[in-house]
Amino acid sequence: MSIHRLGADTIGKIAAGEVIERPAAAVKELLENSIDAGATRIDVSIAGGGVDLLEVRDDGAGIEFDDLALAIERHATSKLANIDDLGELRTLGFRGEALASLAAVSDLRMSSVTRASTSAGVLRVRFGVAEPSRTAAFGVGTAVSARDLFENVPARRKFLRQPGTEAGYVSRMVGAYALAYPFIGFTLVVDGRTLFNTDGNGSAISAATAVWGTNIAESLVLLDTPNDLPDGYTVIGTVSLPSVDRATRQQQFIFAQGRLIQSRQLGTAFEQAYHTLLMIGRHPIGCLHVRVPSDRIDVNVHPTKAEVRFADERLVFAMLQRAVREAIVSHSSHQSIPVVVSSPLTDTTVQRRIALAHPEWATPAIGASMNADPIHPDASQVPTTTGKSLPVLRVLGQVASMFVIAEGPDGMYLIDQHAAHERILFEQLYAGYSARSIDQQLLLHPITMTLNARELSTHETFLDDLRKFGFDIDTFGGDSVVVRAVPAILKIRDIEHTLRLVLEELAGGGRGTSRLESLAISAACHTSIRAGQALSLLEMRELVTQLEGCASPLSCGHGRPTMLRMTADELERQFSRR
Ligand code: ADP
Ligand code: MG
């Protein structure tokens, strides 16, 4: 084929393909236009997954009659005059492409009225062909509807999913903006049914409750920007406590300068804030909103503005992770009572305290490592000691040699003895490590073990980490190792068996975000009290006291819950007293 210029129609469709990938993308562009127009109410309605119809109405500033036709032309915008304006951009849109793109691939109608005029302008564009604008009666603001999306682009239609799935994407999109803009009231209607309705009263929790459901209202917390950040850096948002989790990441939203963005890095920062608090494979929900000085972000790197570039990505990563971690750790439904961790000491004749002369091992406060590598964060961010979140509990007894029953000021607690002890040992290992002082239990008779190839290579990989926690262990020619000391707090009975279990788990990948953390999780798990072990009242009290002293007492290092709580109210209800 000889070289020729493409027709306007083809150019339009090609450009539309980039911006309007699917109905949810069209809805996103329309929402952003309404927000830019200063709307306080935005009503979204779709039918047939948004393909048959998608409509967005707002009560914003509206478009002048004479500008209507221009609004749907490509590269026509009221938001940007020249490239220098990009730096100081206050609007979500700036490319002037969305309406043109949508008009090229749908039967589009737009009605708009400005505050100054009495009648609205109405424009219809059928698959790129505009009809002359006319006037009609219309309330306030702007309504844009698109019917038969992609009817003239069959290839794109084929690529769409079932209407139910597309409707799900639209709902996720509208939900995200409703969460991020609590001062705007959003309504979403799908096939005539109202899915949610936020009241726009400015409360992020009430918006989140409308979008996510009233049943999780009590499990949401608001974020606070950490107070030692450079000027112009803020993070706000609503996130779930570890008591709520989901099988997917679909309800995790990150906004930057007001726009929903995709960022694997920041998603990771969010999830890592829940580390050791959620089960592996479970995910928190949340809507996080980051702002940085406008000259520290490039928003013009993606056709749908979904990706952005931060000049200080690590700082943003750390601030987001810290804000979330601090919010969930400090927030607790329990009253806060300071409890001193009792340090379990074994027979001092076989015990010594070693000083670990490595200042870089000290555990800084949560997220303090602003220079952390965002992809491979230092493990030094692991357990923290901000705030106690368990009240003092009175131990009542044990059930099924597995659970400890206790009473607190706010009801009854059932504590999983294994998970609880695992959490305690995990935090104590780290406490000794960060204090650079570990109590070792010296073995009067060092143990020599022969390792298989897999155990040997795991042992070599983890040798440094084993020593950091107080294992005195050395290779002893060929495939043997000799163990001279172990961490005293673990009170290991069968050292050989335990070490093999730990090496086996670590060879399988480990459960932590670093070698050190994987080791702590595994060592704590294989040395803690088992289910099935009968405990004396004294032992149970000791267990509960130590759990009260944990920074994150509600789950074990693997993320399983350590306890269930039943309030007196709930008990009364169960007995039909209420
Ligand atoms: P952009 O948002 O990048 O400027 P669009 O194609 O989305 O490009 O919109 C073109 C122009 O139409 C906008 O700059 C704005 O002036 C006007 N416009 C679009 N939607 C609305 C709306 N809901 N209310 C008021 N004006 C709007
Ligand atoms: Mg726009």
Image (cartoon, helix red, strand yellow):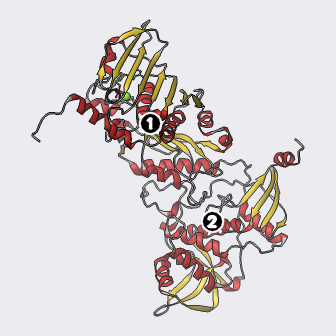
For mark 1, give the secondary structure: helix
Give the residue displayed 61% in from the left and 86% down from the top.
496
| Residue designated by label 2 | 427
Give the residue displayed 49% in from the left and 47% down from the top.
320
Would residue 12 be found to the left or right of residue 555 on screen? left
Q: Quadrant of the N terminus?
A: top left
Residue 416: image location, x then y, percent: 74, 64
Residue 33: image location, x then y, percent: 41, 26
Residue 394: image location, x then y, percent: 83, 59
Query: Which of the 4 image quadrants contains residue 372?
Result: bottom left
Would residue 302 be found to the left or right of residue 478 on screen? left
Q: Could you give the CA–CA distance between mark 1 and mark 2, rounded to whole angstroms?
A: 45 Å
Would residue 363 be found to the left or right of residue 554 on screen? left
Q: Quadrant of the C terminus?
A: top right
Seen from this angle, which residue lies furthest right? 577
Give the residue displayed 53% in from the left and 74% down from the top.
506
Give the residue displayed 51% in from the left and 40% down from the top.
164
Of badges 1 and 2, nearer the viewer stands 1
| Residue designated by label 1 | 24
462 vs 191: above or below: below
Badge 1: few (under 14), some or many (20 or more) residues near its Cα, within 10 Å? Answer: many
Query: Which of the 4 image quadrants contains residue 400?
Result: bottom right
**Amino acid type indicated by mark 1:** Ala
**Amino acid type indicated by mark 2:** Glu
Badge 2: few (under 14), some or many (20 or more) residues near its Cα, within 10 Å? Answer: many
Q: Nearer the viewer, residue 438 or 466?
A: 466
Would residue 290 be found to the left or right of residue 486 on screen? left
